[in-house]
Image (cartoon, rainbow, N blue to C red):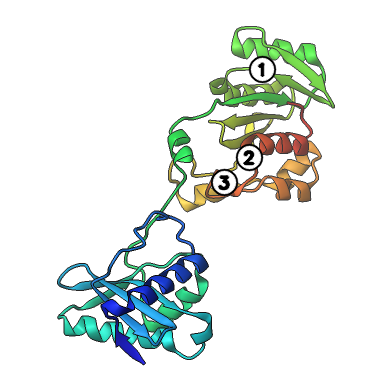
Amino acid sequence: MIRAATKDDRKLVKELRAEFEGEVPDELWHDDDEDYEWDYVLLADDVGVAALDRKGDRTWLLDLLYVRPAGRGKGLGTELVRAAAEYVQQQGAELLALEVLESNAAAKRLYDRLGFTTVERTLAAPVTALVSAGQEGATIGAVHVQNDDVEKVRRDATKVLRREPELAAGDGWTRVEAQPDELRNLARELSFTTGVSVALTLEAGAVVRYVLFDRGSMVDEYLSVPEYFGELPPGDVMALGANPTVVARLTNADPARVRAVARTATSPADLPPADELYKQIAEVLGVQL
């Protein structure tokens, strides 16, 4: 039977609240006052509770809804919500609101079935992540030329940079050091005279990019999080995905491996750590960092 709680029910209400919080720990508000008293409380015998707070003339908040395991499967949750709605309506209000944890799937199913819809969203993020969010990491990278004639690559790179860069050779590729803002143009120029080239970078410590050139033409560009630096048209987002066929043709990489490693996402958190992804893509392309 659904009834209004009285002062004599305080112990029972407190027990029900404690059981609810033990079963569904609040991920945000761990320090709520356990002796808090709501504006109105309903009980379903000694197995269920619905606690309400008035938030304004139009809206009340269903702050707590809980049914003990022994009372579940009998529709008590629905009865409590209906009784709460009837009381709120009698007070002249129009809306009954509630909060539910994303992790509480059973409660979400009940509220969906009863017609509750999302009006606001409460978001949370670790403060450590937010403190460092605006602090960009370093951008590092190099140009890799598909040519093991180190002296030729050195001469050609010196002409472009107007200084002699550091080089390293290995596995048919020559690595050319340059400043981050020089890499794309350097890769393009070297591809005219020296062979297929790729500018591979780890940018802002968060995303990985490669730009692949063949005889002066850019033939593929990949960015692990296409919209990391700002919103793009849908076509541009798609264009920043890797083209395994082109990469395989020019670098002899395994196209299946390119497809598996060079994935894109909407957030760096959905991919391996950027420094690991940087190494993985270098390995797939066959170049040395």
Compared across the picture, whether 5 is left or right of 131 comes to left
Badge 2 local density, few (<14 within 10 Å), some, or many (20+)? Answer: few
Q: Position of residue 139 (x, y in %)?
A: 56, 26
Q: Quadrant of residue 210?
A: top right
Q: Secondary structure at mark 2?
A: loop
Spatial CA span between label 2 and label 3: 8 Å
Residue 59, x across and y down, in percent: 22, 72
Three-letter code for the amino acid on which mark 2 is drawn: Pro
Instruction: Give the distance between the C-alpha atoms of the residues marked 1 and 2, in whole angstroms.
Output: 23 Å
Residue 169 lies, with reference to residue 162, above or below; the image says: below
Please determine whether, in this image, residue 216 is positioned above or below residue 179.
Answer: below
Q: Which numbered disc covers residue 273?
A: 2
Q: Quadrant of the N terminus?
A: bottom left
Determine the CA span between mark 1 and mark 3: 29 Å
Q: In this orientation, which residue lies closer to the viewer: 257 or 129?
A: 129
Q: Which residue is mark 3?
A: 269
Which residue lies at the image location 56% right of the left edge and 51% below the top edge?
A: 238
> Mark 3: few, some, or many residues within 10 Å (few <14, many ≥20)?
few
Sequence-first tag of 1 and 3? 1
Give, as a three-letter code, the residue at label 3: Ala
Rendered location of residue 182, percent (x, y): 57, 20
Above or below, comparing residue 43 to residue 169 in the picture:
below
Between marks 1 and 3 in the image, the one whose residue lies nearer the viewer: 3
Q: Which amino acid, mark 1?
A: Glu
Q: Which residue is mark 1?
A: 177
Q: Badge 1: few (under 14), some or many (20 or more) residues near its Cα, within 10 Å?
A: many
Name the element at disc 3. Answer: helix
Q: Earlier in the sequence, mark 1 or mark 2?
A: 1
Number of callouts in the render?
3
Tell me if label 1 and label 3 are in contact, CB under 8 Å.
no
